[in-house]
Image: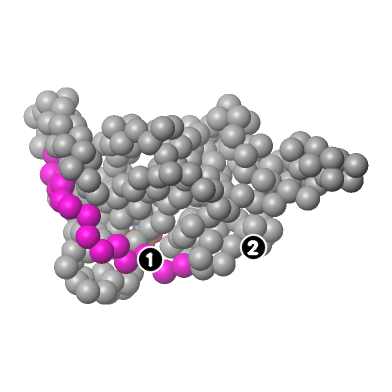
């Protein structure tokens, strides 16, 4: 009986719910550089079908990389996604349409536009889509680089889920440690929702899968409403 009720309550997310950090779903990886990685992480994290995100340095040859010693690497977002729910093509569309700068204008390498493919299929899709974008955006010249994914150096903890971490008190209630900052499903989602990615309708649909308490949900909902459609910038 007790078990039945606790199960019911959990389902309804009334009490005893725990933030859903780990999801065991088959996934593929994608890596993009599109300027300051704070915005990119929020953009992808807020998409249905994206399971995890992390920010880091990649696309270069330096054996190590830190924010202040980035070498020849680029600020990148690493995305784990469920290809049954979101396609690589959809991720590419988000990539092309959400550069703050650097898509057609040369910026410093740290912020340059970069697609790092993980499979031949991704390579092909990236090559096809850059062609389409070239046509669409002519006479502007796209300067995006497409290359094979190599080592990814995760950024410092304070860069991970940067928009979420701005909510200091709220974040404490999620009990994120260094590992969860890189791997948590709910943290990736909230890092998008809190800045308005996804919008209210999607949030209401997905909110029961996040394992948040009614108080936590109410807190996030307020920001979803406030920031919906605000756009992303660093
Ligand atoms: N303009 C940003 C860049 C941050 S970033 C993660 C700043 O506030 O410093 O490169």
Residue 225 seen: no
Residue reaching furthest to the right: 1
Q: Position of residue 148 (x, y in %)?
A: 17, 52
Residue at 22% over, 40% down = 122
Residue 106 seen: yes
Quadrant position of ligand 1? bottom left
Residue at 38% over, 36% down = 83
Residue at 53% over, 45% down = 189
Q: Specify whether residue 164 is painted magenta.
A: no
> Tag 2 or tag 1, which sits nearer the N-term?
1
Q: How many marks?
A: 2
Q: Which residue is mark 2?
A: 175
Q: Is residue 77 above or below residue 156?
A: above
Q: Which residue is mark 1?
A: 155
For label 1, the SS is: loop
Give the colour scheme of this rendering. one colour
Q: Position of residue 44 (x, y in %)?
A: 41, 43
Q: Is residue 225 above or below residue 56?
A: above
Q: Considering the image in quadrants, where does the N terminus appear?
A: top right
Question: Which of 84/35 is in front?
Answer: 84
Q: Position of residue 47 (x, y in %)?
A: 45, 37
The residue carrying mark 1 has its beta carbon less than 8 Å from ligand 1:
yes
Please state the extent of the stretch shown in magenta in the rendering: 142-157
Residue at 30% over, 44% down = 100
Question: Which of 89/101 is in front?
Answer: 89
Residue 105 is marked as none
In the picture, measured across the screen, residue 182 lies left or right of residue 19, that is left
For label 2, the SS is: loop
In the picture, measured across the screen, residue 68 lies left or right of residue 19, that is left
């Amino acid at each position: 009986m007790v078990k039945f009720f606790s199960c019911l309550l959990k389902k309804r997310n009334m009490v005893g719910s725990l933030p859903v950090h780990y999801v065991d779903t088959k996934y593929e990886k994608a890596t993009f550089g599109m300027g300051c990685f704070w915005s990119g992480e929020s953009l992808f994290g807020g998409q249905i079908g994206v399971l995890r995100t992390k920010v880091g340095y990649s696309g270069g040859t330096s054996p190590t990389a830190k924010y202040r010693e980035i070498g020849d690497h680029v600020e990148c977002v690493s995305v784990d996604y469920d290809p049954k729910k979101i396609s690589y093509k959809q991720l590419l569309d988000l990539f092309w349409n959400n550069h703050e700068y650097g898509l057609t204008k040369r910026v410093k390498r740290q912020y340059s536009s970069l697609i790092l493919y993980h499979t031949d299929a991704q390579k092909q899709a990236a090559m096809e889509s850059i062609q389409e974008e070239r046509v669409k955006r002519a006479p502007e010249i796209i300067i995006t680089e497409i290359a094979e994914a190599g080592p990814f150096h995760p950024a410092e903890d304070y860069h991970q889920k940067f928009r979420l971490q701005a909510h200091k008190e709220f974040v404490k209630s999620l009990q994120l440690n260094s590992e969860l900052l890189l791997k948590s499903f709910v943290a990736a989602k909230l890092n998008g929702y809190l800045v308005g990615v996804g919008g209210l309708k999607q949030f209401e649909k997905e909110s029961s899968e996040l394992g948040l308490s009614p108080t936590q949900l109410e807190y996030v909902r307020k920001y979803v409403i406030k920031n919906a459609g605000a756009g992303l910038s660093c």
